[in-house]
Image (spheres, grey):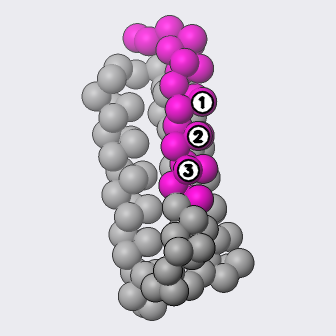
């Protein structure tokens, strides 16, 4: 079992990484017309990335071992990637 402080140790890196990932399209829009997001695209991406962050918070605090925690995170990330891919091609 992991100590509670271990989950807190990774928290800033996870949330900062998610914010940086959300900022990439915003920065790309300044340099190219290939990226054309509006406020709804950013809101959709923010909700998906927040889901990953919240899932990390929950899985880090699970009472089980490392494998179930990694499996839970892999499942959430996989689902988010599937949703993102469907949204990217206009299925959603």
Secondary structure, mark 3, is helix
Residue 16 image label: 2
Stretch in magenta: 1-23
Q: Residue at x 28, y 28 (%)?
A: 67
Does label 1 or label 3 sit earlier along the sequence?
1
| Residue on which disc 1 sits | 12
Instruction: Kindly check if marks 1 and 2 are in contact, taking CB atoms under 8 A apart as contact.
Output: yes
Instruction: Kindly check if marks 2 and 3 are in contact, taking CB atoms under 8 A apart as contact.
Output: yes
Q: How far apart are the alpha carbons under marks 1 and 3?
A: 12 Å
Q: Residue at x 53, y 74 (%)?
A: 31
Secondary structure, mark 1, is helix
In this rendering, would 33 be left or right of 26? Answer: left
Q: Is residue 88 above or below residue 54?
A: below
Count of residue discs? 3
Q: In the rendering, at what x and y percent does residue 26 appear?
A: 60, 68
Q: Is residue 47 above or below residue 92?
A: above
| Camera-nearest residue between 91 and 11 | 11
Residue 17 seen anywhere in this rendered image of the structure? yes
């Amino acid at each position: 079992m992991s100590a509670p402080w271990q989950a807190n140790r990774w928290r800033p890196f996870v949330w900062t990484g998610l914010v940086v990932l959300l900022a990439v399209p915003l920065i790309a829009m300044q340099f190219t017309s290939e990226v054309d997001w509006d406020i709804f695209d950013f809101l959709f991406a923010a909700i998906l990335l927040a889901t990953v962050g919240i899932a990390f918070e929950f899985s880090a605090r699970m009472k089980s071992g490392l494998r179930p925690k990694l499996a839970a995170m892999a499942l959430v990330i996989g689902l988010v990637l599937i949703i993102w891919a469907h949204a990217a091609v206009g299925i959603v």
